[in-house]
Image: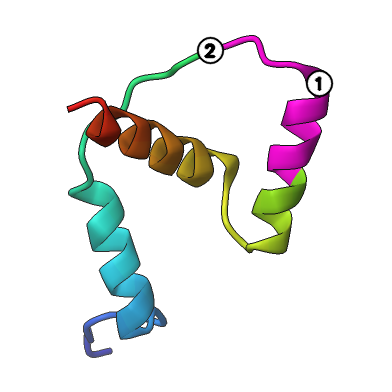
Amino acid sequence: MTLQAKTTRRTSDIKEAALAEVTAEPTKRLNVEIPARLHRQVKTAAALADTTIVDIVTAALTDYLERQR
C-alpha cells in the first residue's frame, strides 16, 4: 500500500474565494431597526441582483461616508 497525496476537488475559483474569505478584513455586527417596508425592499433588491443585504448596506454606508468628506 502506497500513500498518495489527497487530490483536491476545489477549482481555482473556489480556492481563491476561500483564500479571500480567510484574509478578509475583520467585521463587526451592526444591529439596526428599520421599517419593515424598507427591509422588504432591500431584501428583494438583493435577491434580484444576486447579492446580499450585507453587500448593499456596506456599499450604501461607504457611499454615505465618502459624501460626508
Where disc 1 sits, the SS reads helix
Q: In the picture, which quadrant includes the N terminus?
A: bottom left
Q: Which residues are magenta?
A: 32-43
Residue 65 among magenta residues: no
Please name the predominant secondary structure of the magenta segment in the image: helix
Q: CA distance from mark 1 to mark 2?
A: 14 Å
Numbered disc total? 2
Q: Give the amino acid type for the residue marked by disc 2 in the picture.
A: Asn
As rendered, which of 5 and 59 lies closer to the eye? 59
Q: Looking at the picture, does residue 52 appear above or below residue 28?
A: below
Q: Looking at the picture, does residue 36 appear above or below residue 43?
A: above
Residue at 32% in and 61% down: 18
Residue 33 among magenta residues: yes
Residue carrying label 1: 36
Q: Position of residue 33 (x, y in %)?
A: 64, 9
Q: Position of residue 51 (x, y in %)?
A: 57, 56
Residue 3, by quadrant, is bottom left
Does the image show residue 7? Answer: no
Residue at 74% in and 28% down: 38
Q: Position of residue 44 (x, y in %)?
A: 77, 48
Where disc 2 sits, the SS reads loop
Residue carrying label 2: 31
